[in-house]
Amino acid sequence: MCKHHASRFKKPVVAISLLFAALLLSACGSQDVKQQMPASGTPDIDDLNVVDCLLPGQVRSLGSTKYMTPRRPVLTTAADCRIRGGEYVAYDRADYKTALAVWMPTAEAGDADAQANVGEIFERGLGGSPNYEAAAIWYRKAAEQGNPRAQFNLGTLYEQGLGVEKDKLQALNWYRKAWGLEEDSVMYQSAAQEAQDELRAQLQKTLSEKDTQIKLLNNQISGLQKKIGSSAETAELQQELNQLKVWVKNLEAERMVAKNEIDLIPRMRQPQEGLTTRVSTTSDAQAIKVDDMEFGKYYALIIANQNYDNIEDLLTPYSDAQRAKQILEENYGFSVTMLLDADNTTVMKAINELNELVTEDDNLLIFYAGHGTRIGAGELETGYWLPVNATPPPDDTFWVSNEFVTRHLARIKAKRVMVVADSCYSGLLSSAPGYLFMDEKAQYTQDYIRYKLPKKSRLLLASGGDQPVLDNIGQGHSVFARAFLDTLEGAGTIISGPELYLKIKDNVASRAKSVGFDQMPEFKAIKGAGHEVGDFFFVRKAS
């Protein structure tokens, strides 16, 4: 799980003073279009002001046809506007409608620069009252088209809570886009984490205060309930008791809001710079057969690293692993070996021992939940799983490389192997492109199964590609684990790897997007591990 760290940014003064000075200093009274220079030929002070100028359209030819382009709004001086044949309006500085009239048609046509200008007009109000809600709407339109000015301005609104709900993380994300920073850049992650930690601390303080208040009120309620039975002032005490209960109910609702906000603060499965328990195999695997199709035995190795020695702990790997174990054993007949908080030796030994466990007719699932990271070497990126004794980046002591996992997958005798990796940069486990021949309308029939069943498979289902992934937003699970486990639990008799992927990818993407985060799972073959275009099938025991 990777953590993004975030810093506080102060909104600088937007440097468009010339534009607004022109609007504020426009000649009073006259609303006429200026067309002539002063008789002396020397520009007066108004000629030096920047105005919203509407230039005439251009005559263009297309073959033998000539046509006139629409008029174009620009920011320029009043003198330059007249020289170029344009027009501008000297308007009342308390009234921004005239400025809007120049830019709005182009903005409504989808021009990002014009949309950003409209946003600035609404935000400044041009001497009147700012309309921050309208400014945010127009900034967002331009920002989503990649306009850096609008992205920065929208960030300032989020930072101050003007026209939108105050949100430092949203502000930081728009600043990041305006500056062209990658989402996993060290600078952005450091800043994002600071903002997340600050927000989490504030909400935890609110929770603590609400808990104390609720406890005190409940004590008062208990005292009043004892008095009511023996007091002549029963009606008055009952009224006081009812009021206290209302207060408690309101506080509990406020407490739940704070708790939900904490749950929605993104946490990642990747550490920042700066005790091992093994649960043995719990049951024997049984061979699975459907009609005349032999699927072999099913084995799973689950690795869940949550409590780290040298880097920040995670929230959800334990719950992800426990539920995965239950579903795989009870619904699908897997023999499960689970490692909780495993060091590098334990992880590598467990993977090495798999070759003695499975046969050429069997199926193996490796599920990893924990920290992940990457190291770049020239144009190549190498991914790593981080055991609990791993040192923080950039020191790569005790890390388990994707290369180690891949080479063992090539050696393992199992017919079908799937790695489900829920960690940052988990997509780096395979350099293959995305899986082909997959779409929502595909029919995974018995003919498909019979064709794929004899062929070896080495497949990767990753919670994300070459990027950070979330550790929460799954109601006690990571966003990916929640979708993965819900889909397995609700599946029919047989579900193939591509079907599983197609059912979870949009779920993960939409849940992540709800907290302003981009995460898209990947499904692909693992090159260099013996893949022969086979598939992996989850088959319910009842079948």
Image (cartoon, helix red, strand yellow):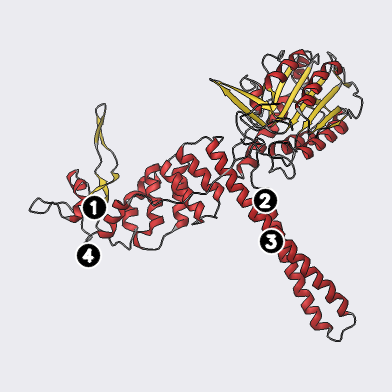
Between residue 27 and residue 182, name the one nearer to us: 182
Q: Are marks 1 and 4 in contact (CB under 8 Å)?
A: no
Residue beneath the point at 19% across and 43% down = 84
Residue 118, given in percent of the width and then of the height, sits at 38, 51
Say what amino acid the circle numbered 3 marks: Glu
In this view, the mark in front (4 or 3): 3
38 relative to 416, above or below: below
Residue 511 sits in quarter? top right
Task: Give the number of the disc on residue 262.
Answer: 2
Residue 378, given in percent of the width and then of the height, sits at 53, 20
Residue 514, given in percent of the width and then of the height, sits at 62, 45
Mark 4 to mark 3: distance in Å? 54 Å
Name the residue tied to disc 1: 49
Mark 2 to mark 1: distance in Å? 50 Å
Between residue 333 and residue 407, name the one nearer to us: 407
The mark that comes first in sequence, 1 or 4, is 4
Q: Are marks 3 and 2 in contact (CB under 8 Å)?
A: no
Q: Is residue 67 left or right of residue 7?
A: left
Residue beneath the point at 30% across and 61% down = 93
Name the residue tied to disc 4: 29
Count of marks, rendered view: 4
Q: Secondary structure at mark 3?
A: helix
Say what amino acid the circle numbered 2 marks: Ile
In this view, the mark in front (3 or 2): 2
The mark that comes first in sequence, 3 or 1, is 1
Residue beneath the point at 26% across and 51% down = 51
